Image (cartoon, rainbow, N blue to C red):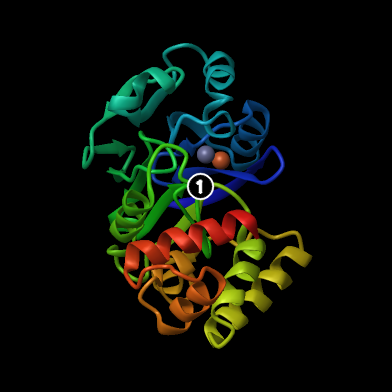
Amino acid sequence: MRVVPVPQLADNYGYLIIDEASGEAAIVDVAEAKPVLEAAKAEGVRITAILSTHHHFDHVGGNQDLINALGVGALRVFGYAADAERIPGISDPLDDGAEFNLGSLHGRALFIPAHTSGHVAYYFENDAVVFTGDTLFAAGCGRMFEGDAAQMKSSLERLASLPDDTRVYCGHEYTQGNLAFAATLEPGNERLQEWRKQAAALRALGEPTVPTTIGLEKAVNPFLRSDNEELRRSVQAKRPGTADDDVAIFAATRSLKDEF
Ligand code: ZN
Ligand code: FE
C-alpha cells in the first residue's frame, strides 16, 4: 500500500490509498472532488472507492461530485451502516468489524463514536495503517459533538490498542496546535518537545506532519495519557476540583483544549 495525503479545504486531509499491484486506489474522505481527481491523475491511478469516516461536510462534502465525475456505478462508497443516511452515495454500509477488499488490500471498519455517533476508522492490519478521521489526531482528538468524554476515551483506547508501529493518518493538520497545548500539561515530556521541533520543521517546508504512529501517540497525546502524573497535576491545577479519576481528567483535558 502506498498512501498519498491529499490536502483539501483549509487544513483537511484526504488520503489516496494505492494498491500498487492493481493500480486501483481508494480515497479516504472527500471534501472536494477536484484535488482528489488531480492527485489520482498525478499518481496514475484509478479511484474505485471512497472510504468515508464520518458525515461532516469537510469529509463527505465532495462524495457526490466525485461520483458524478467518475461515472455513476464506478465507485463503491463505504461508511458506517447505522449512519448511512448521512453518507452521500453510500453503497457498502459497514458494521463494526466488517472487513472488505480493495484490490489486494484488506481493510476493516472500527466503530469509534463520540466526534459523531457514526464515526469509523479504517484499519489495514497487513499494512499497519489506520485512518482515524476526526477521532484521533496527531497529539489530539476531535471535539465530542455527538458523544461524551467516556465514549471518546473508549474510542481512543480502542485505537491505542493497535500495535505501536501502526501508522496513523488523521483528518486534519492540527498537529502543531495540539502539541503546543500538550506541552502546557506535560512540560517535562521530552518526546513531546522533540516531536514539536520536528513538526515545526516539517510545516516550515510545507510538508504534512502525518503519519504519526500509535506508539508515538501513547507517548505524547494528552488524550491517551489521563493516567500520567504530571498531566493529572497540571489538569487539576488548571481545573481545581476535578475528580481524581481517568474520565474526569479526560473531560477536563478536553474542556481545557476547547478553550486553548
Ligand atoms: Zn468532523
Ligand atoms: Fe473534520
- Residue holding disc 1: 143
Image height of 85 relative to 171, above or below: above
Q: Residue furthest front?
A: 241
Looking at the rendering, which quadrant does residue 201 occupy?
bottom right
Q: Where is residue 127 in the image (x, y as percent from the top left)?
A: 35, 57
Q: Is mark 1 within 8 Å of ligand 1?
A: no
**Which residue corresponds to the image point at 26% horizontal and 37% vertical from the top-left?**
100
Please tell me whether residue 84 is drawn above or below residue 146 in the rendered image: above
Indicate the position of residue 227 as horizontal and vertical percent values.
Answer: 35, 76
Q: Where is residue 145 in the image (x, y as percent from the top left)?
A: 47, 39
Residue beneath the point at 29% across and 63% down:
162
Callout 1 crowding tier (Cα within 10 Å): few <14, some 14–19, many ≥20: some
Question: Residue 114, located in which quarter of the rendered image?
Answer: top left
Q: Compared to 17, does 52 lie above or below?
A: above
For mark 1, give the secondary structure.
Answer: loop
Instruction: Please give left or right for residue 194 compared with residue 102 in the image.
Output: right
Q: How many labels does the image show?
A: 1
Image quarter of the C terminus? bottom right
Q: Where on the image, by quarter, is ligand 2?
A: top right
Which of the two residues, 103 or 61, is positioned nearer the viewer here?
A: 61
Residue found 53% across the figure and 83% down from its top: 191
Q: In the rendering, at what x and y percent does residue 65 appear?
A: 59, 18
Q: Could you tell me the amino acid type at mark 1?
A: Arg
